[in-house]
């Protein structure tokens, strides 16, 4: 029960961040501090370029278990560092765990952080 509640809170937070950021861009002319709003859209374009990847990402947050298809992992590994910080706002640890999962799934060597 506790992990289900935690997953629900995590999903709610993720959706809230995704919903608020465009609103901030419209009202204040910017998105997250130090991060241009157009760049945030570009970040999601990387994930959305693979059919079902956004859903896989949200499902993984909800269930606290990674389960990505290879094409989604390729997109995730290709996310630039500033995007990873925005897509994984709960700390770099989560982004690093997802990247490690995908790297292992694809059998690739991770690229150096930029």
Image: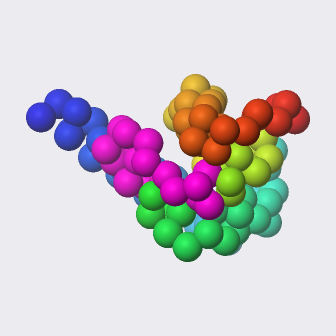
Instruction: Tell me the residue at 38%/54% (across/down).
Output: 59
Q: Nearer the viewer, residue 109 or 54?
A: 109
- Among all residues in the image, which is located at the extreme left? 1
Q: Nearer the viewer, residue 87 or 21?
A: 87
Q: How is the image coloured?
A: rainbow
Instruction: Tell me the residue at 34%/47% (across/down).
Output: 62
Q: Position of residue 5 (x, y in %)?
A: 21, 39
Rendered-image quadrant of the N terminus: top left
Q: Position of residue 79 (x, y in %)?
A: 74, 50
Let me know if residue 25 appears in the view: no
Question: Residue 11: within the magenta?
Answer: no
Q: Nearer the viewer, residue 5 or 48?
A: 48
Q: Quadrant of residue 84 in the image?
A: top right
Instruction: Tell me the residue at 58%/26% (across/down).
Output: 93
Q: Position of residue 78 (x, y in %)?
A: 76, 51
Q: Quadrant of residue 88 in the image?
A: top right
Main SS, magenta residues: helix
Q: Which residues are magenta?
A: 57-73
Q: How many marks?
A: 0
Instruction: Tell me the residue at 45%/58% (across/down).
Output: 56
- Residue 20 placement, left or right of 12: right
- Residue 37 placement, left or right of 94: right
């Amino acid at each position: 029960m506790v992990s289900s509640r935690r997953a629900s809170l995590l999903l709610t937070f993720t959706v809230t961040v995704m919903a608020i950021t465009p609103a901030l861009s419209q009202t204040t002319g910017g998105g997250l501090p130090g991060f241009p709003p157009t760049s945030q859209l570009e970040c999601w374009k990387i994930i959305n370029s693979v059919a079902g990847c956004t859903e896989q990402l949200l499902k993984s947050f909800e269930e606290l278990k990674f389960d990505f298809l290879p094409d989604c992992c390729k997109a995730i590994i290709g996310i630039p560092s500033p995007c990873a910080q925005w897509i994984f706002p709960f700390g770099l640890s989560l982004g690093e765990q997802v990247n490690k999962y995908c790297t292992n799934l694809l059998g690739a060597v991770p690229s150096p952080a930029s």
